[in-house]
Amino acid sequence: MTYAVFVEGITGLDEARDMGERVKIAAYQAINRTTERGRAQAAREIRDEVNFPARYLNPAEKRLFVSKKAQRADLEGRIRARTRATSLARFVTGTAQPNKAGVRVEVAPGKARFLKRAFLVKLRAGSSEIDTRNNLGLAVRLKPGEVLRNKSDVRKLDRNLYLLYGPSIDQVFRARDGSGVADDISPGLAQFMEREFLRLMELRRG
């Protein structure tokens, strides 16, 4: 999932070429500072909603990072959020033993829940489909004839065994309906970019 920052009204390379050099430099620098600021702000707000550790959203981990920087002839910057599903095991608190039912999870900070039928399971190493911790997943086994009410956050492992997911980074960053952290921070980032552009123009004027 990608969030773009660009100069409104400049849609093509030809228009960028027609701009003065001083304007183009100020524009791409303002965009790059805005994307860096937006990534950091998005990380903080995502962690306010979901109990990810700070290092989890470090840009070096490539889960939430600036994927494209603006240049003089390409006035667009991009922030990318990882779409890989997050194992609910990442949110387990306290001590829990594999294959032993009854774990406590804290997805929203400060709001822990006890899942009496869920248990940790060892997953195959090297899976690219789910973001795990120590190759552990959180699973639940259904009783004969039992069905899950919400199937959007689960994955079937065996006949009656299901792996439970937590929210992915992109689900919090930018939901399918357009809401999410990216939408929340957009007005402030637009104002910051405008102020930064004008500040840089003033510096170059001097």
Image (spheres, helix red, strand yellow):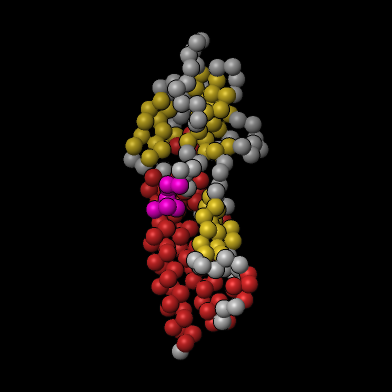
- Residue drawn at the location 56% of the way across and 82% of the way down: 20
Q: Is residue 50 visible?
A: yes
- Residue 37 lies in the magenta stretch: no
Please name whichever residue, 202 or 158, is drawn nearer the observer in this view of the structure. 202
Q: Residue at x 51, y 77 (%)?
A: 26
User: 118 or 62: nearer the eye?
Assistant: 62
Q: Is residue 121 visible?
A: no
Question: Foreground: 191 or 95?
Answer: 191
- What residue span does the magenta drawing correspond to? 178-184
Q: Residue at x 46, y 29 (%)?
A: 96
Q: Give the residue at the far top of this rendering.
A: 144
What is the tally of numbered marks visible in this picture?
A: 0
Question: From the viewer's perspective, is 115 left or right of 10?
Answer: left
Determine which quarter of the picture holds residue 14.
Answer: bottom right
Is 196 placed above or below 47 here? below
Q: Nearer the viewer, residue 104 or 175?
A: 175
Q: Position of residue 9 (x, y in %)?
A: 51, 67
Residue drawn at 45 percent across, 63 percent down? 37
Q: Position of residue 142 (x, y in %)?
A: 50, 16
Q: Residue furthest bottom?
A: 206
Q: Residue furthest right?
A: 126
Place of residue 44 in the rendered image (x, y in percent of width and height, measured from the top left): 41, 53
Percent position of residue 117, x then y: 44, 20
